Amino acid sequence: MNVSVIGTGYVGLVTGACLAEVGHEVVCMDDNPAKVEVLLQGRMPIFEPHLEGLVARNRRAGRLRFTTDVAEAARDAAVIFICVNTPPRPDGDADLTYVEVATRRIAEHATRDTLITEKSTVPVQTGQWIEKTLAIYRTRPGITFEVASNPEFTREGMAVEDFLHPDRIVVGVSSPQAEAVLRELYAPIVEGRFACPIHPECRVDRAVPFLVTDIASAELIKHASNSFLALKIAFANAVADVCEAAGADILQVVKGVGLDKRIGRAFLNAGIGFGGSCFPKDLKAFVKIAERNGYDFALLKEVERLNVRRRELVVAKLQQALWILKGKRIGLWGLAFKPHTDDIREAPALAIARRLLDEGAEVRGYDPQAAAKAQEAVPGLTICPDPYAAAAHAEAVVLCTEWPEFAALDFARVKAGMVRPLLLDGRNALDREALLALGFEYLGIGRGTAPAPRRPA
Ligand SMILES: NC(=O)c1ccc[n+]([C@@H]2O[C@H](COP(=O)([O-])OP(=O)(O)OC[C@H]3O[C@@H](n4cnc5c(N)ncnc54)[C@H](O)[C@@H]3O)[C@@H](O)[C@H]2O)c1
C-alpha cells in the first residue's frame, strides 16, 4: 500500500520505517530541511534502538523515501499519517497548529481518495476539525477524504519493538471502508506476517488485538492510557514517601502489590518522577480536555503536582546529606528522560541540574546518548566522557536515568575518585547492599529499612 507520513520525528520515523519493513511503500515528509537532509545522507536525527538498520535496509530496497515536499508525499498515498508534534500551550492545552498546517497542505496537494489518519496525540474531537479543514482547503473536488484516529503507544527506547509487536492496535473510524484500509495496512503486524528484524527467532502465537472504535473514543484511549500510567508512577512515589517515613522498603512493597494480577508490577517504580515528551504534556492536555467537557479532573492535577515535587525531593535529600550545596561538585548519571533514548524533553535530570546550578553547585553529567542535547539545554552543566569522570572529586553522585551500564560500573573505582562516597540512587536501580559493603553512603527512594542481612551462599 502507498503510505505517507507527515512529520518525521520519534513517532513518524518509526512509523514510516516499520511500515516499510512489513512491505508498504512509504514516503516520510518533514518540513524541517535539516532533518530530511540528515536522513538523505543516511544518518539518524534521533537515537532509537534498531531504527538505523531498518531505515537503511528499506531505503536500499526502495520502499522508504524522505522528502520535504508535501506534494510528493500527498500525491499517491492511500493513507497519510499525521505524526507532527503537539506541544503544550502555556495553559496546558495541546497546540494543534502543526496538525492544522499539515492537514491544510494535504488538502491542497492530495490527488486521490485518501484516508488521513491522526497518529499525533490530540484532544478528543480533533478528528472533526481535521475533517472540516480538509473540506475547506481541498483543491480537487472529485476526490474523497476520510479521517481516522490511530493513536500511537510506542515507548521511546523500545519504539521499533513496540511498533512491530504492539499490545494492541487501536483505530477510530467512521466508516467500514476506513476500517478495511487500516486492517489491510496492519495485517502483516496483526498476523505476524513479516520477518522480524529484531528477533530472528520471533514466532507469533496470537494475533495482535485490533480494536475498532469511533474516532472520539480512539482519541480518548490515548490520553486515558498515558494518564493511567502516570498515575501508577505517582502512586508508587507517594507510597515510597510513606515507606521512607515508616521504615519500610518500597521495593519489597511494590513486589508484593504488583504480584496481584489486577494491579501488575509494571509502572510501579518509585523514583525521581516521569518526564519525556508525552506523559507531562498529555496529562496536562487531558486535564484541559476534561475541563472543557465540564469535569474537574482533580486526580490528574494531583498526579502532576506529585511528579513535579520529585525533583525537589532530590535537592532536599542532597541538602540534608551535604548541608551546603554551593561550591559542591555533584555528578549526575543519566540525562535523558529515560534509558535507551537521546530524548531530553522534560527530563528530570535536567530540572535537577538546573536547580543544583541555581544553588551554586558544580554539576557534572554523563549520558551515553543524550549528552549533546543536554549540553545545549543546560549550558552550565559540564558534560563528562564517562560515568567515572562525572563522579571524579564529587561530593555526591545522583543516578537520574537507569541506563543498564550504571549498574555494571566498577564501584570501587567510582568510590576511589570521589571526595565523599555518597550515592543517591534516584531510580532504585543499584545494588544497595553491595554499595554499602563497599563503604558508600547509599540513599535510595522510599528505602526506609536497614538492608536485609545477606543470605549465606
Ligand atoms: N515520542 C513518543 O514516543 C510518542 C509516543 C506516542 C505519541 N506521541 C505523539 O506523537 C506526536 C509526535 O511526537 P514526536 O515525539 O514524534 O515529535 P517530534 O517533535 O519528534 O516530531 C515531529 C516532527 O513533525 C515535524 N513537523 C511539524 N509540522 C510539520 C508539517 N506541517 N509538515 C511536516 N512536518 C512537520 C517536525 O519538524 C518534527 O520533525 C506528538 O503528538 C506526540 O505526543 C509521541
Image (cartoon, helix red, strand yellow):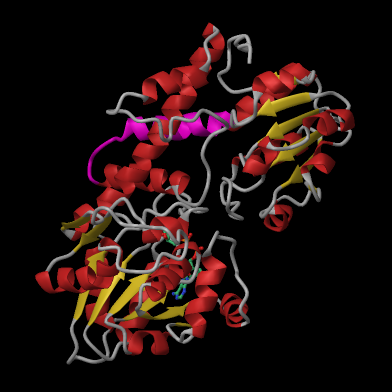
Q: Nearer the viewer, residue 165 or 348?
A: 165
For image coordinates 24% across by 92% down, the residue present is 140
Give the image location of residue 200, x and y in percent. 45, 62
Residue 176's place in the image compared with 142, above or below, is above
Tell whether 388 sits left or right of 101. right
The magenta segment is 293-310
State yes or no: residue 405 in magenta.
no
Among the 4 quarters of the image, the one containing residue 320: top right
Among the 4 quarters of the image, the one containing residue 395: top right
Give the image location of residue 355, x and y in percent. 70, 36
For image coordinates 67% across by 54% down, the residue present is 370
Give the image location of residue 203, x and y in percent. 34, 57
State yes or no: residue 306 in magenta.
yes
Q: Is residue 397 visible?
A: yes
Q: Quadrant of the N terminus?
A: bottom left
Residue 126's place in the image compared with 254, above or below, is below
Give the image location of residue 98, x and y in percent. 42, 69
Tell whether 54 sits left or right of 135. right
Q: Quadrant of the C terminus?
A: top right
**Magenta portion: prevailing SS class:** helix
Q: Nearer the viewer, residue 449 or 405?
A: 405
